[in-house]
Image: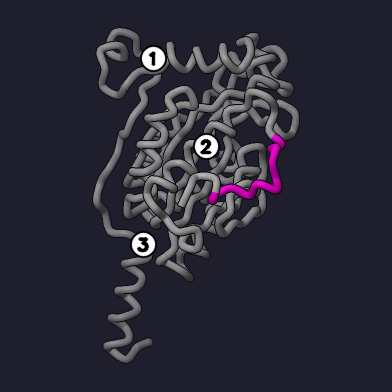
Amino acid sequence: MAVQDYIRKRFFPHLWCQGCGHGIVLNSLIRAIEELGIRKNDLVMVSGIGCSSRITGYVDVHTLHTLHGRALAFATGVKMSRPELRVIVPMGDGDALAIGGNHFIHSARRNIDMTALVMNNQIYGMTGGQFSPLSGPGVKATTAPFGNIDHGFDVVKLATAAGASFVARTTTYHVHQMISILKEAISHKGFSVVEIMSQCPTYFGRKNKLGGAVDMLDYFKSHTTAKGSDAHKKDPLMIERGIFVKEDRPEYCSDYDMLVKELQLKGDA
């Protein structure tokens, strides 16, 4: 199956702003799916609300465009009822870690077999450029014109502490790494979290005087480094990329199925 077979061509051109990194994420995601050879009928993508959540409208697989912050809750229902399906959940800053934060930590705790993509552009783009849980101190936004004072979440540390069995980070500049990581995340049996640093030139770049899309991509190139590299040891402010957690742990749907079978044998179900 060719890459273009996974796209709903009738909905193009897409609605994302010029230079938005989410289109790069879409490109990399469908290439990862195509390289894995996943059949369209075996794949479900679930999203909530936000710029990132528009991604489900452009892929020709089973899709759910759901409520803000509830994408993982809907995805859990899909996975529990049809555990044989591959489930991918693309989310933005708020969808995953503000209104959806509770679902995020408990999905990780349960280690339910799905792939959560956190498309991190450090701002709420769809609703007008408000600061998000991933913005960090000093960032300017519509709701922080003099600079944000809230500290941001570290997605990798949060996902790891909550119990996700696969945790990774990459950027929209590092496309080949993104495709490779997405393939591993989707193939992993358990809750996989992939943070993708994505540029928003329309709001984040403009309000923080970071230039256009190319300038922001250059920033990802120069301010991130491979996990465990000497560059990070010399400068702790360099953001690490790569796979941080990859562990084999009991998976929720499998454990649930075993419990049901045990009860059936005992005659309790």
Question: Residue 26's x, y, as percent?
Answer: 54, 39
Judged from the image, the secondary structure of the residue bearing numbered disc 2 is helix
To which quarter of the image does residue 99 belong? top right
In the image, what residue type sits under mark 1?
A: Met
Residue in view at x 43 percent, y 47 percent = 34
Judged from the image, the secondary structure of the residue bearing numbered disc 3 is helix
In the image, what residue type sits under mark 2?
A: Asn
Question: Residue 10's x, y, as percent?
Answer: 70, 48
Q: Nearer the viewer, residue 133 or 17?
A: 17
Q: CA distance from mark 3 to mark 2?
A: 30 Å
From which residue to which does the magenta span run?
5-15
On residue 246, the disc is none
Which mark lies nearer to you, 3 or 2? 2
Question: Residue 160's x, y, as percent?
Answer: 35, 39
Earlier in the chain: of badge 3 and badge 1, it is 1
Q: Which residue is mark 1?
A: 238
Name above or below for residue 156 compared with residue 188: above
